[in-house]
Amino acid sequence: MRFWALIEPSLPSMVSVTPAQRGTFEPSSTVSRYLQPIDEMFMFLNYLALRLKQHDLADRFGVHQSTVSRIITTWSNFLYAVLGSVRIWMAVEKIREHLPAEFKDYADTTVILDCTELRCQCPSSPLLQSEVFSVYKSHCTLKGLLGVAPHGAVTFISPLYAGSISDKQIMRESGILSLLRPGMAIMVDRGFLVGDFVPCKIYRPPFLSG
Protein backbone atom coordinates (compact mmCIF):
# COMPACT_ATOMS: atom_id res chain seq x y z
CA MET A 1 0.00 0.00 0.00
CA ARG A 2 2.93 2.34 0.63
CA PHE A 3 4.22 1.63 -2.86
CA TRP A 4 0.74 2.26 -4.28
CA ALA A 5 0.54 5.61 -2.47
CA LEU A 6 3.83 6.64 -4.09
CA ILE A 7 2.83 5.86 -7.67
CA GLU A 8 -0.92 6.64 -7.59
CA PRO A 9 -0.41 10.39 -8.30
CA SER A 10 1.27 9.46 -11.60
CA LEU A 11 -1.65 7.32 -12.86
CA PRO A 12 -3.18 10.10 -15.03
CA SER A 13 -0.06 9.97 -17.20
CA MET A 14 -0.34 6.21 -17.78
CA VAL A 15 -0.61 5.20 -21.44
CA SER A 16 -2.40 1.87 -22.03
CA VAL A 17 -2.00 -0.64 -24.81
CA THR A 18 -5.25 -0.92 -26.76
CA PRO A 19 -6.88 -4.35 -26.66
CA ALA A 20 -7.36 -4.39 -30.44
CA GLN A 21 -3.75 -3.81 -31.43
CA ARG A 22 -0.83 -4.46 -29.09
CA GLY A 23 1.37 -1.99 -30.97
CA THR A 24 -1.03 0.94 -30.42
CA PHE A 25 -1.04 3.07 -27.28
CA GLU A 26 -3.82 5.29 -25.94
CA PRO A 27 -4.35 7.35 -22.78
CA SER A 28 -5.60 5.05 -20.03
CA SER A 29 -8.82 7.02 -19.68
CA THR A 30 -9.93 5.92 -23.19
CA VAL A 31 -9.35 2.20 -22.61
CA SER A 32 -12.04 0.07 -20.96
CA ARG A 33 -10.85 -1.19 -17.58
CA TYR A 34 -11.96 -4.59 -16.29
CA LEU A 35 -10.05 -4.19 -13.02
CA GLN A 36 -9.37 -1.27 -10.73
CA PRO A 37 -5.87 0.22 -11.21
CA ILE A 38 -4.72 -1.05 -7.80
CA ASP A 39 -5.79 -4.58 -8.78
CA GLU A 40 -3.96 -4.25 -12.10
CA MET A 41 -0.83 -3.32 -10.20
CA PHE A 42 -1.31 -6.29 -7.85
CA MET A 43 -1.68 -8.59 -10.87
CA PHE A 44 1.54 -7.20 -12.36
CA LEU A 45 3.43 -7.72 -9.08
CA ASN A 46 2.13 -11.30 -8.92
CA TYR A 47 3.40 -11.81 -12.45
CA LEU A 48 6.88 -10.54 -11.49
CA ALA A 49 7.20 -12.18 -8.08
CA LEU A 50 5.64 -15.59 -8.77
CA ARG A 51 6.28 -15.96 -12.53
CA LEU A 52 2.65 -16.97 -13.00
CA LYS A 53 1.49 -17.78 -16.52
CA GLN A 54 -0.92 -15.37 -18.18
CA HIS A 55 -3.72 -17.93 -18.39
CA ASP A 56 -3.29 -18.59 -14.65
CA LEU A 57 -3.56 -14.87 -13.87
CA ALA A 58 -6.60 -14.58 -16.14
CA ASP A 59 -8.31 -17.33 -14.13
CA ARG A 60 -7.36 -15.85 -10.75
CA PHE A 61 -8.50 -12.32 -11.62
CA GLY A 62 -11.55 -13.31 -13.69
CA VAL A 63 -10.51 -11.61 -16.96
CA HIS A 64 -9.56 -12.68 -20.48
CA GLN A 65 -5.94 -13.67 -21.16
CA SER A 66 -5.59 -10.84 -23.69
CA THR A 67 -6.55 -8.40 -20.90
CA VAL A 68 -3.76 -9.84 -18.73
CA SER A 69 -1.29 -9.40 -21.57
CA ARG A 70 -2.37 -5.76 -22.07
CA ILE A 71 -2.13 -5.01 -18.34
CA ILE A 72 1.38 -6.49 -18.07
CA THR A 73 2.65 -4.48 -21.04
CA THR A 74 1.00 -1.28 -19.83
CA TRP A 75 2.35 -1.54 -16.28
CA SER A 76 5.82 -2.52 -17.50
CA ASN A 77 6.01 0.68 -19.55
CA PHE A 78 4.42 2.81 -16.83
CA LEU A 79 6.67 1.69 -13.97
CA TYR A 80 9.76 1.87 -16.19
CA ALA A 81 8.97 5.54 -16.82
CA VAL A 82 7.91 6.42 -13.26
CA LEU A 83 10.62 4.55 -11.35
CA GLY A 84 13.28 5.36 -13.93
CA SER A 85 12.77 9.07 -13.28
CA VAL A 86 13.61 8.72 -9.57
CA ARG A 87 17.11 9.96 -8.76
CA ILE A 88 18.89 7.33 -6.65
CA TRP A 89 22.42 8.80 -6.74
CA MET A 90 23.35 9.78 -3.17
CA ALA A 91 25.16 12.89 -1.98
CA VAL A 92 28.74 12.30 -0.83
CA GLU A 93 27.85 13.54 2.66
CA LYS A 94 25.11 10.92 3.02
CA ILE A 95 27.43 8.14 1.87
CA ARG A 96 30.13 9.11 4.37
CA GLU A 97 27.52 9.36 7.11
CA HIS A 98 26.74 5.65 6.64
CA LEU A 99 30.26 4.47 5.78
CA PRO A 100 30.95 0.98 7.24
CA ALA A 101 33.98 0.55 9.49
CA GLU A 102 35.50 -1.85 6.95
CA PHE A 103 35.97 1.11 4.58
CA LYS A 104 38.19 3.10 6.95
CA ASP A 105 41.12 2.71 4.54
CA TYR A 106 38.90 3.76 1.59
CA ALA A 107 36.93 6.54 3.27
CA ASP A 108 36.46 8.59 0.10
CA THR A 109 34.79 5.72 -1.80
CA THR A 110 31.57 6.97 -3.33
CA VAL A 111 30.47 3.93 -5.31
CA ILE A 112 31.47 0.33 -6.03
CA LEU A 113 31.05 -0.38 -9.74
CA ASP A 114 30.76 -3.61 -11.68
CA CYS A 115 29.06 -4.89 -14.80
CA THR A 116 26.51 -7.68 -14.73
CA GLU A 117 25.10 -9.80 -17.54
CA LEU A 118 21.60 -11.21 -17.93
CA ARG A 119 21.15 -14.26 -20.13
CA CYS A 120 18.67 -13.67 -22.96
CA GLN A 121 17.15 -15.59 -25.86
CA CYS A 122 19.41 -15.84 -28.90
CA PRO A 123 18.07 -13.79 -31.84
CA SER A 124 17.48 -15.60 -35.15
CA SER A 125 19.46 -12.95 -37.03
CA PRO A 126 23.20 -13.82 -37.24
CA LEU A 127 24.04 -10.10 -37.04
CA LEU A 128 22.05 -9.63 -33.81
CA GLN A 129 23.52 -12.85 -32.44
CA SER A 130 27.03 -11.48 -32.88
CA GLU A 131 26.03 -8.27 -31.09
CA VAL A 132 24.50 -9.90 -28.02
CA PHE A 133 26.92 -12.86 -27.75
CA SER A 134 29.11 -12.59 -24.67
CA VAL A 135 32.54 -14.24 -24.89
CA TYR A 136 32.74 -14.13 -21.09
CA LYS A 137 29.45 -15.99 -20.58
CA SER A 138 29.55 -18.00 -23.85
CA HIS A 139 25.89 -17.12 -24.41
CA CYS A 140 23.66 -14.32 -25.63
CA THR A 141 23.34 -11.72 -22.89
CA LEU A 142 22.32 -8.19 -22.07
CA LYS A 143 24.86 -6.24 -20.05
CA GLY A 144 24.53 -3.38 -17.60
CA LEU A 145 26.55 -1.36 -15.08
CA LEU A 146 25.58 -1.34 -11.40
CA GLY A 147 26.77 1.06 -8.73
CA VAL A 148 26.47 0.35 -5.01
CA ALA A 149 27.34 2.65 -2.12
CA PRO A 150 29.73 1.19 0.52
CA HIS A 151 26.84 0.61 2.95
CA GLY A 152 24.93 -1.44 0.37
CA ALA A 153 22.42 0.93 -1.23
CA VAL A 154 22.11 0.65 -5.01
CA THR A 155 22.81 4.14 -6.32
CA PHE A 156 23.27 3.65 -10.08
CA ILE A 157 21.68 1.40 -12.70
CA SER A 158 22.61 1.81 -16.36
CA PRO A 159 20.49 0.89 -19.36
CA LEU A 160 21.07 -2.59 -20.78
CA TYR A 161 23.45 -3.02 -23.72
CA ALA A 162 24.26 -5.88 -26.10
CA GLY A 163 26.43 -8.50 -24.41
CA SER A 164 29.41 -7.95 -26.71
CA ILE A 165 30.00 -4.40 -25.40
CA SER A 166 33.10 -3.83 -23.28
CA ASP A 167 33.13 -2.59 -19.69
CA LYS A 168 34.94 0.54 -20.87
CA GLN A 169 32.29 1.38 -23.45
CA ILE A 170 29.46 0.90 -20.94
CA MET A 171 31.32 3.19 -18.54
CA ARG A 172 31.50 5.86 -21.24
CA GLU A 173 27.90 5.54 -22.42
CA SER A 174 26.03 4.88 -19.16
CA GLY A 175 26.18 8.44 -17.78
CA ILE A 176 28.12 7.52 -14.62
CA LEU A 177 31.09 9.73 -15.60
CA SER A 178 29.00 12.89 -15.29
CA LEU A 179 28.31 12.00 -11.62
CA LEU A 180 31.95 11.51 -10.63
CA ARG A 181 34.18 14.33 -9.34
CA PRO A 182 37.95 14.57 -8.68
CA GLY A 183 37.41 14.46 -4.89
CA MET A 184 35.63 11.10 -5.10
CA ALA A 185 36.87 7.53 -5.43
CA ILE A 186 35.34 4.46 -7.03
CA MET A 187 36.03 0.83 -6.15
CA VAL A 188 36.27 -1.84 -8.88
CA ASP A 189 37.75 -5.30 -9.34
CA ARG A 190 41.11 -5.80 -11.01
CA GLY A 191 39.63 -6.55 -14.44
CA PHE A 192 37.70 -3.28 -14.63
CA LEU A 193 40.31 -1.23 -16.53
CA VAL A 194 38.90 2.30 -16.77
CA GLY A 195 41.70 4.30 -15.16
CA ASP A 196 42.64 6.11 -18.36
CA PHE A 197 39.46 8.21 -18.51
CA VAL A 198 37.76 8.17 -15.07
CA PRO A 199 38.00 11.65 -13.46
CA CYS A 200 38.58 10.38 -9.90
CA LYS A 201 40.62 7.98 -7.78
CA ILE A 202 40.21 4.22 -8.29
CA TYR A 203 40.57 1.52 -5.62
CA ARG A 204 41.20 -2.14 -6.51
CA PRO A 205 41.46 -3.97 -3.17
CA PRO A 206 41.91 -7.76 -3.04
CA PHE A 207 38.28 -8.90 -2.98
CA LEU A 208 39.10 -12.55 -2.33
CA SER A 209 42.50 -12.46 -0.64
CA GLY A 210 43.56 -15.81 0.78
Image (cartoon, rainbow, N blue to C red):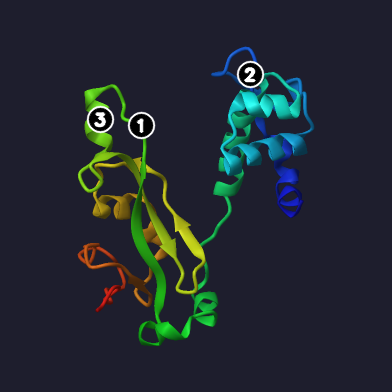
Quarter of the picture holding the C terminus: bottom left
Left or right of 143, for residue 148:
right
Q: Which residue lies under the disc numbered 2?
A: 66
Q: Secondary structure at mark 2?
A: helix
Label 2 environment density (alpha carbons within 10 Å; few <14, some 14–19, many ≥20): some
In this rendered view, identify the residue nearer to me: 203 or 91. 203
Left or right of 55, for residue 151:
left
In this rendered view, identify the residue nearer to me: 85 or 128. 128
Q: Which residue lies under the disc numbered 3?
A: 129
Left or right of 15, for residue 183:
left
Question: Number of labelled discs?
Answer: 3
Q: Residue at x 70, y 38 (%)?
A: 41
Residue 21 x %, y %: 59, 14
Residue 10 x %, y %: 71, 42
Q: Are marks 2 and 1 in contact (CB under 8 Å)?
A: no
Q: Which residue lies under the disc numbered 1?
A: 121
Tell me which amino acid carries mark 2.
Ser
Q: Residue at x 74, y 21 (%)?
A: 30
How far is the residue under mark 2 from the one under mark 1? Answer: 23 Å
Tell me which amino acid carries mark 1.
Gln
Residue 170 x %, y %: 31, 51
How far is the residue under mark 1 from the one under mark 3? Answer: 10 Å
Q: Residue at x 77, y 28 (%)?
A: 35
Q: Give the number of the disc on residue 190.
A: none
Label 3 environment density (alpha carbons within 10 Å; few <14, some 14–19, many ≥20): some
How far is the residue under mark 3 from the one under mark 2? Answer: 30 Å
Left or right of 157, for residue 49:
right
